Amino acid sequence: MTRVLFVHGTMTRYTEEYLRTFRLIERRLRGWRGRTVVEKFPWGEFWGAELNPRFLAIPGADERAADVLGGGSEDDALSEAARWALLYDDPTAELRLLLEPAAAGAYEPQTVTSQQLRRAARQIADTPPAPPLAALLAEADIAETFPAAAIKIAGLFQQGELQPLLRVIPDDQREAVRPALARAIVAAAMVAARTDSVYPEAFLDAGLRERVVAAVDESLIGGAVLGGTGELLAFLPATALTRLLLRPLRVDLTRALLQFLGDILVYQAKGARLRAELAAQLGPEPTVLLAHSLGGIACVELLLSDAAVRRAVPLLITVGSQAGMLHELGALATAPRPDGEPTPLPADFPPWLNICDRNDLLSFRAAPLFAGRVRDVELDGLTPFPDAHNAYWRSDAVWAQIISAVAAPGDVNVQLRE
């Protein structure tokens, strides 16, 4: 039997979303080995920060801002994250950006009619989703909001600023329009479904999100002859990206970071109590520690300071954690400030797998800071920040690493290398 203790991270409390994540982790681990016991350690209510400050000090806090961070890059994953960063703030952003060069007078008027796009949009708005698309919408948690989203986006082509879209897009850019329309509809449905208490699966599972978009795109083919996938970021002027992407990010990016820092600061005051309670959860059975974000910091510090705990833990897995960065800053209470060389881990420190995502601004490497049996795995997910911080559990690549490590902890340093 394998026992795994899940230690959650920053900005997490004992809510339905936490329980859904825990059930997902439990399902994945038990699917690998039926006798696996997965237990939870929900510490946030006792040792976490207040999650609802008003953040009145942030300039622009009263303005609408983007929900996530993305950035223009030649890297496909980063470009896709940037695209969805725009869409989560404004589902029509990509379509509006297609008009940007025209607004600047870069294109001559085209003879192409917009009737094809209007017909495609109205078709998907007026027709119930086919069974394959309906199943995907239900899995993505956007089945209820999808019809209204399709009607809303389709209506933008009947009147208003998007009406002349196809009349100004040159032929070599027409391929971008239909998939952009599909993404706009899906994004609108996602935004409408997301509330404080409901977090649609499509936000956390980039693969599922892309399957929904592909199904919507396929549904549009019958009403429009446009084809291809199109690359929005390949031809947009830098001024458009700067105005529509960078300025709106200030408030929500700062809010996310301050919420993260709130838990970190409270941990500095209450960390010893949290670690003592965590140690008490281990018991006589060898226990794998699977820790997210700040939970990883607590686990690393506990293992550094307590030899008895090290004997009870055969494997440490940290996901989206900041232990390496805090150590580099000299901010770990149970480890000395690094002196320029990686800090040696105790000889009996368990194998340590550290997983981070380049789109997750709250995840950091550990191997350059700690000398010992620690290995970093860096991913390039398609989910933009801050959703990337909680999307690890929906990634097959992450689970391949976790399952491989749990199956053979002693081989962590040589497993699944690219």
Image (cartoon, rainbow, N blue to C red):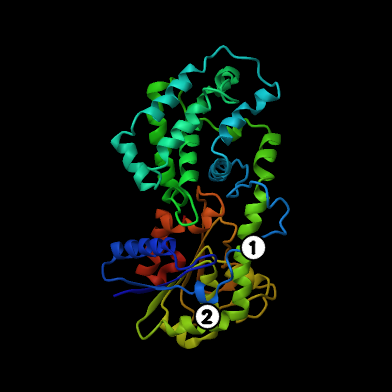
Q: Is 139 left or right of 343, judged from the image as shown?
A: left
Q: Is residue 229 visible?
A: no
Residue lying farthest to the top in this orientation? 111
Distance from the alpha carbon under mark 2 to that under mark 1: 21 Å
Task: Give percent across and percent down for residue 70.
Answer: 60, 47
Identify the secondary structure beneath mark 1: helix
Indicate the amino acid at tag 1. Leu
Q: Quadrant of residue 24?
A: bottom left
Question: Few, some or many C-alpha atoms within 10 Å of disc 1 (few <14, some 14-19, many ≥20)?
Answer: some
Q: Marks 2 and 1: CB-CB under 8 Å?
A: no
Task: Give percent across and percent down for residue 304.
Answer: 54, 81
Image quarter hosting the N terminus: bottom left
Which residue is rendered at x = 39% and y = 78% of the image? Answer: 287
Task: Give percent across and percent down for residue 78.
Answer: 57, 45
Task: Give percent across and percent down for residue 252.
Answer: 62, 53
Q: Is 244 left or right of 186, judged from the image as shown?
A: right
The one nearer the camera, 203 or 145, is 145
Q: Which residue is mark 2?
A: 274
Identify the secondary structure beneath mark 2: helix
Indicate the amino acid at tag 2. Leu
Q: Which residue is mark 1?
A: 258
The one nearer the camera, 95 or 236, is 95
Which residue is rendered at x = 68% and y = 44% of the image? Answer: 246
Residue 198 higher or lower than 25, as above or below: above
Disc sitting over residue 159 in the figure: none
Q: Quadrant of residue 137?
A: top left
Q: Is 82 left or right of 209, judged from the image as shown?
A: right
Give the number of marks.
Answer: 2
Which residue is rendered at x = 58% and y = 50% of the image? Answer: 68
Whichever of labels 2 and 1 marks the residue nearer the N terminus, that label is 1
Residue 254 higher or lower than 233, as above or below: below
Q: Is residue 185 visible?
A: yes
